[in-house]
Amino acid sequence: MNTNNSNPNEKAGPFNELQIAVVYDNHSVDERLKTGWGFSAVITVGAKKILFDFGGEGGILLENMARMGIGPEDIETAAVSHHHADHTGGLEGVLEKNPDITIYLPKGFPAKVKRAIVQRHNRIIEVKNSKKLFDNLYLIIQEGRFVNEQFIVVRTAKGVVLVAGCGHPGIVKMIESTKELLRENILLVMGCFHLEWALKGKVERIIRKFREMDVRYVGPAHGTSDKARELFKKHFGKRYIEAGVGKIIDIAELD
């Protein structure tokens, strides 16, 4: 696993505070907010707010953000997991409100999609290899059979937090890559586990892998079926987090 830094544990210590606000999802935990097929989350570490993915539709994304007290002007940095429309659909709407956001795209983004972004916006950085975005916050590139995808990993004082946009290359592979890079305990894996149509046997095999890798908390969201979520809840019990639009995960509440 290549990064732009030889030692990811250098410099500043891990974050003591971290919040993840789910602002777009097809699951809901807040009836005031609108659901839609796709995913977007705002990750807050210190004074920084990182928008991860843009959901499927700008109007829904912006309305949900507003109801959760998050303005596009609060975002300086954004990252896109991959090129599918349910993760890029709200991008144009956000850029209309704040054209100064720096956006990190995985290398190999389809030229047509990239041109559409560049027409409105020139603050784009392509990520070829896994990259330290800030101290203790990383973008990891995971190669998949059909889709290469980047995901966010944050080192916290309680362990590593992994946020997956869609999980196309396999959520287990993403966890393995994270442990290979940071060699630390995994506090939380949340986001899309890409198990919308997975049979019970496959889900249970993945859950066993999670347990073998000592994943402490799970928060399956977009792209994870209700049946799969129930299986994770059954196996993780109090360490299962009901994730969906409106959910705010604060690591201060995790032990």
Image: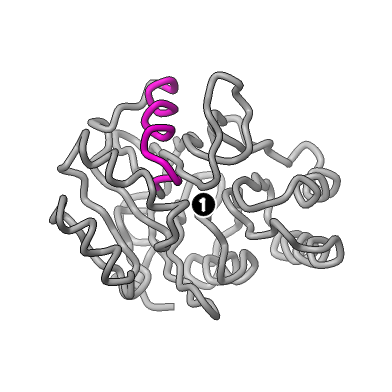
Amino acid of disc 1: Val
**Residue identifier under label 1:** 163
Residue 15 is situated, as x and y percent measured from the top left of the image, at: 42, 43
Q: Quadrant of residue 62?
A: top left
**What residue range appears in magenta?**
54-68
Residue 25 is situated, as x and y percent measured from the top left of the image, at: 55, 40
Question: Residue 214: within the magenta?
Answer: no
Residue 8 is situated, as x and y percent measured from the top left of the image, at: 38, 65
Question: Residue 59: within the magenta?
Answer: yes
Residue lying at 37% horizontally and 56% vertically, measured from the top left: 80
Residue 95 is situated, as x and y percent measured from the top left of the image, at: 23, 42
From the viewer's perspective, tell me whether residue 139 is left or right of residue 103. Answer: right
The relative height of residue 175 versus residue 47 in the rendered view (above or below) is below
The relative height of residue 111 versus residue 23 in the rendered view (above or below) is below
Residue lying at 77% horizontally and 60% vertically, measured from the top left: 207
From the viewer's perspective, tell me whether residue 70 is left or right of residue 208. Answer: left
From the viewer's perspective, tell me whether residue 224 is left or right of residue 46. Answer: right
Picture quarter with the C terminus: top right
Residue lying at 23% horizontally and 58% vertically, measured from the top left: 116
Closest to the observer: 73 or 9?
A: 73
Closest to the observer: 68 or 188?
A: 68
Picture quarter with the N terminus: bottom left
| Snapshot colouring | one colour
Mark 1 residue crowding within 10 angstroms, few (<14) / some (14–19) / many (20+): many
Closest to the observer: 69 or 108?
A: 108
